[in-house]
Image (cartoon, rainbow, N blue to C red):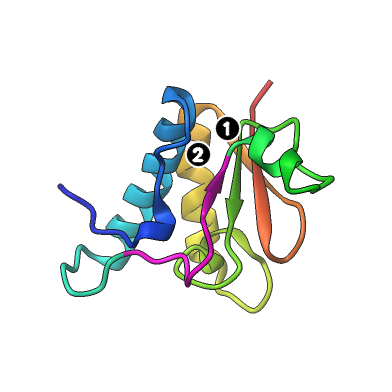
């Protein structure tokens, strides 16, 4: 299945392992929302995926030792990573998908989450 996304969901700067995580996130969202060609997965105008180095370059403090940063400040990622005002079913589904890869999500603030390997 080819998943339609907006340009803010780019994974170009990510390494192979980070792309695997990002693609799992996008596949999980597409699976839960149903594949729809008319409505691509969007970050709401915010870049969605950052490497820890990119995050550090922005001057951010939290998540810089993670494998991947997911910015969910708006857009379609929010209900999958934020506990603020969302149903927990989507969040739980994302937790399961990441655990299958050997990772977990740690919400750093209400607008971004860091993805860490399970030790």
Residue found at the very far top of the displayed protein: 119
Image quadrant containing the C terminus: top right
Q: Alpha-carbon distance for marks 2 and 1?
A: 5 Å
Circles 2 and 1 in contact, beta carbons < 8 Å: yes
Crowding at dot 2, Cα within 10 Å, few <14 / some 14-19 / many 20+, comes out as: many
Q: Residue at x 46, y 53 (%)?
A: 93
Q: Earlier in the sequence, mark 2 or mark 1?
A: 2
Where 85 sits versus 40, above or below? below
Q: Nearer the viewer, residue 97 or 69?
A: 69
Instruction: Report the side of 77 relative to 116 (left or right).
Output: left
Instruction: Report the side of 39 relative to 88 (left or right).
Output: left
Q: Which residues are magenta?
A: 41-50
Disc 2, SS: helix
Query: Residue 57, image x and y in percent?
Result: 73, 41
Q: Residue at x 16, y 67 (%)?
A: 37
Q: Nearer the viewer, residue 30 or 70?
A: 70
Q: Please tell me in which quadrant of the rendered image residue 6 appears.
A: bottom left
Q: Residue at x 52, y 57 (%)?
A: 47
Q: Nearer the viewer, residue 89 or 104?
A: 104
| SS majority, magenta | loop
Q: Residue at x 39, y 41 (%)?
A: 24
Q: Which residue is mark 1?
A: 103
Where 23 sits versus 30, above or below? above
Q: Is residue 7 magenta?
A: no
Where 97 sits versus 88, above or below? above
Query: Residue 36, image x and y in percent?
Result: 19, 68
Disc 1, SS: strand
Query: Residue 38, image x and y in percent?
Result: 18, 74
Query: Residue 108, image x and y in percent?
Result: 76, 53
Q: Which residue is mark 2?
A: 98
């Amino acid at each position: 299945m080819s998943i339609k996304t907006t340009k803010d969901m780019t994974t170009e700067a990510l390494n192979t392992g980070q792309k695997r995580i990002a693609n799992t996130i996008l596949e999980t969202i597409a699976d839960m929302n149903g594949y729809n060609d008319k409505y691509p997965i969007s970050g709401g105008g915010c870049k969605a995926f950052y490497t820890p180095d990119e995050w550090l370059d922005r001057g951010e403090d939290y998540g810089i030792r993670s494998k991947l940063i997911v910015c969910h400040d708006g857009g379609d990622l929010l209900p999958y990573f934020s506990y603020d005002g969302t149903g927990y079913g989507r969040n739980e589904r994302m937790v399961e998908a990441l655990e299958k890869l050997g990772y977990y999500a740690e919400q750093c603030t209400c607008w971004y989450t860091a993805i860490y390997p399970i030790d």
